[in-house]
Amino acid sequence: MRRPSREAGPERVRRAYASYGRSQRRRRAWAADNRGNIAARAELLSACWELVGAQLADGAEVLDAGCGTGFWLRSFVERGVSPGRLHGIELLPERLAASRDALPAAVQLRQGDVRRLPYDDASFDVVLLFTVLSSLGGPQDVGMALREAGRVMRPDATLLIYEPRYPNPLNRHTARIPVGLVREALGPVEERPVTVWPPVARRLGRFTEPVYRRLAGRRWATSHRLLAYRNRSPKLSLG
């Protein structure tokens, strides 16, 4: 039985980020210079390149739906993707402003809701939804966001979804996204286990590189998954 939808909208999201900001524990855990965090982000980025690297090399138009403060868009720029082919949409104006400060001016950023994307049909070759679905109000909102992502995908485009594999009892602001919910909205998806359990990875210190490399990709040792949906049909019917 599906749980009821939570409150949706910018105020709930803003309160969640404010709560994170007040937590010293979370700030320490998410520190950008922690070796475990660096390894996890590098692993995810490498997995993305395995899945969409050929499309990116061929001049793909990329949308980061729920781009936050621009970390992943910046990572794509650093890997050589042309800023003029990168697009981001973010719900909260303050986070969008942070993206503008962090990214080249050629990256095209807009304020908006992933449940109602302000783009034409078949606009993008690669769409990212990274830890966005789990922050929405519930299954209905998740379905809306997935169908919108499908709508703006070109034929042969790829949607990448990064989410935890398990519910987090310490974070009431997020919810686990079942793979079945994605399949129900879009169709078949490829699944890859990624991200060595953060509480372990963040404590590896100088042993991070060899230990993380051994554990990476092992289902029992990973907390998240990367889902890839490929739009194989010429036109996606959204019903």
Image: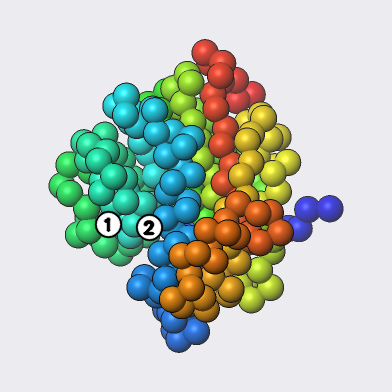
Residue 67, how many percent across, how many down? 38, 52
Q: How many marks?
A: 2
C-alpha separation, residue under disc 1 versus residue under disc 2: 7 Å
Q: What is the basis of the colouring in this image?
A: rainbow
Residue lying at 56% horizontally and 19% vertically, measured from the top left = 232
Of mark 1 and mark 2, the one earlier in the sequence is 2
Q: Which residue is mark 2?
A: 68
With respect to residue 10, does 52 lie above or below?
above
Rate crowding at label 2 as few (under 14), some (14 to 19) or many (20 or more) other CA atoms within 10 Å.
many
Q: Hey, which residue is sitting farthest left in the picture?
A: 105
Residue lying at 34% horizontally and 57% vertically, measured from the top left = 71
Residue lying at 32% horizontally and 55% vertically, measured from the top left = 70
Residue 215: numbered disc: none
Residue 29, how many percent across, how many down? 48, 77
Can residue 115 be seen at all in this image of the molecule?
no
Q: Are marks 1 and 2 in contact (CB under 8 Å)?
A: yes
Three-letter residue code for mark 2: Gly
Q: Hey, which residue is sitting farthest bottom in the picture?
A: 24
Query: Looking at this view, is 17 or 82 the one in front?
Result: 82
Residue lying at 39% horizontally and 44% vertically, measured from the top left = 64
With respect to residue 77, does 218 lie above or below?
below
Q: Which quadrant: the C terminus?
A: top right
SS class, disc 1:
helix
Query: Looking at this view, is 137 or 163 the one in front?
Result: 163
SS class, disc 2:
loop
Three-letter residue code for mark 1: Ser
Can residue 197 be seen at all in this image of the molecule?
yes
Rate crowding at label 1 as few (under 14), some (14 to 19) or many (20 or more) other CA atoms within 10 Å.
many
Residue 2, how many percent across, how many down? 78, 53
Q: Which residue is mark 1?
A: 99
Query: Looking at this view, is 102 or 151 the one in front?
Result: 102
Q: Is 136 on the left or on the right of 39, as rendered?
A: right
